[in-house]
Amino acid sequence: MGVPEGFEEFVAGASPRLLRTAFLLTRDRGHAEDLVQTALARAWRAWRRVQGDPEPYVRRIMVNTYATWWRRKWRAEHPTDVLPDAGGASPEAAVDQRDWLWRALGRLPRRQRAVIVLRFYEDLTEAQAAHALGVSVGTVKSQTSKALARLRLDDTITREEVWR
Amino acid sequence: MNLTDLTDVLRDHAGPPPDAAHGPRMSGIRAKVRASRRRGVIAAAVSLVAVLGVTFALTAPAQRESEPAVPTTFPAYHAGTRIVAQAADRAPAHEVSVQVVPTRRDLRVFTRCEAGGRELRVRVTVNGMYSHETTCGHQPADGVVSWTAESFPVGSPVTFGMSVGESDVTQPTAGPIPAGTAFALAIGEEVPVEDYRFPPRPESLSPVDPLLSAPAPRIDLRRADRDQPNGTWRTTVDLPDRPVRIQVASNTPGRIQVLANGVRVYDHVKWTYEATTGLSLPQDLWEKDSGAKAEVGAAVEITVIAERTSGDWAVVLR
């Protein structure tokens, strides 16, 4: 099975960057590797048709794979409308703000998390994120808004429980 | 919380570059490409059968009039669901729709296209409103979406639409549909294992052992007995001095549940006769999911409950 020209070099060069994004999406190194390999395998088949920089194309496959048909495959996370009990910690045991924010990100539904990663880690514009996810700019706006609202809600609940 | 925090947290957790194990990664990609091609061959065979079926139906109209419509694209039971509605067409048409009156909210939407291995872009609508985009053409059953409660009311007609076109990453929307493309949309209701109609059993099955040839040490619980599809097996094992992953492999449909000290930690359900493994679940996740607790190095009672299995299965702790 011949490797398309330039594909292996692309994998060697782009994998660390793709893995970082995949890890932010999946929060698991093993799942991130699987997600990256899945996206690259799909890109392999379309490699000759990809023009210009292939990385946005692979990233788009990866994010969409994560947000759509991996729902059934993965058991590792179950987004819920009910925020889990943050635990009755004392003020002294208050978790670091960044730590709870990371945990709160993990509680976001996948598409919202994908939007947040694209907007705030990849630093994509709304239009670029919309293109990467295959949705409208309006959807990116609404998903971002919902995600941030949810993070702020999580913030409020966590802080109330910790500091009241 | 401010947005700077958010960016910082994401950058912190993205961390340093993971070990770039290029060789194993390329091997993994090759394996996925090969598997995808195998599925493509199967899909092509299914398509051929479907085309022959359509041809037969068109050439025998008298007989057709007296027979119920036969799904030509998705079988009556597919991927854990019973198909309640489906529609198919081919280029130059580029969209189809189906209407269902949901009696429940766990519907699943399947989209599929056959375009000579090309990846196409699919847009799905619900009652005319954009729902999501996915791709098709590189797998027999792409674009599986589980529906959630807020998507539509139970008891009222809902129209699902699908449109297909070329997937061009430089364009915000799908392009024209390639000539010769066939595509289909189906809506399925989830069915419990006990009620699901499995596909016909093939004469021979692929072994599960090659799927589990990862480095030892590991703890295996396995059986191979098609005459005992249901059963419960218990054993007590000493866990190693490190967290263990749990993985299940099987080569027939059915359900395999794994319990640790009486608490279900793994639920493996499959619907086909392919030899496959489930997710290799690390201990922190199976403990988090289930509430079970198994100390490293301690003895743990492992229970395996099998339902409607008829081939080889293996439960591996490693």
Image (spheres, grey):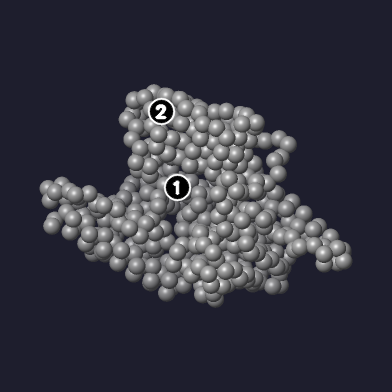
Q: Quadrant of residue B179?
A: bottom right
Residue A131 higher or lower than B245, as above or below: below
Q: Amino acid at mark 2?
A: Glu
Front tag of 2 and 1: 2
* Chain where mark 2 sits: B
Image side of residue A7 versus residue B92, left or right: left
Q: Secondary structure at mark 2?
A: strand
Q: Position of residue B99 (x, y in %)?
A: 61, 71
**Residue bearing mark 2:** B301
Rendering coords of residue B116 (x, y %): 70, 58
Report whether B198 appears left or right of A164.
right
- Would you name the residue on which mark 1 appears? A75
Question: Looking at the image, how many numbered discs can be counted on the residues?
Answer: 2
Q: Nearer the viewer, residue A12 or A106?
A: A106
Q: Disc 1 residue type?
A: Arg
Is residue B163 among what the camera can see? no
Judge whether B27 appears above or below B138 on screen. above
Residue B149 image offset from top left, x and y in percent: 45, 64
**Residue visible at 29% across and 62% down?**
A151
Dot 1 falls on a residue whose secondary structure is loop
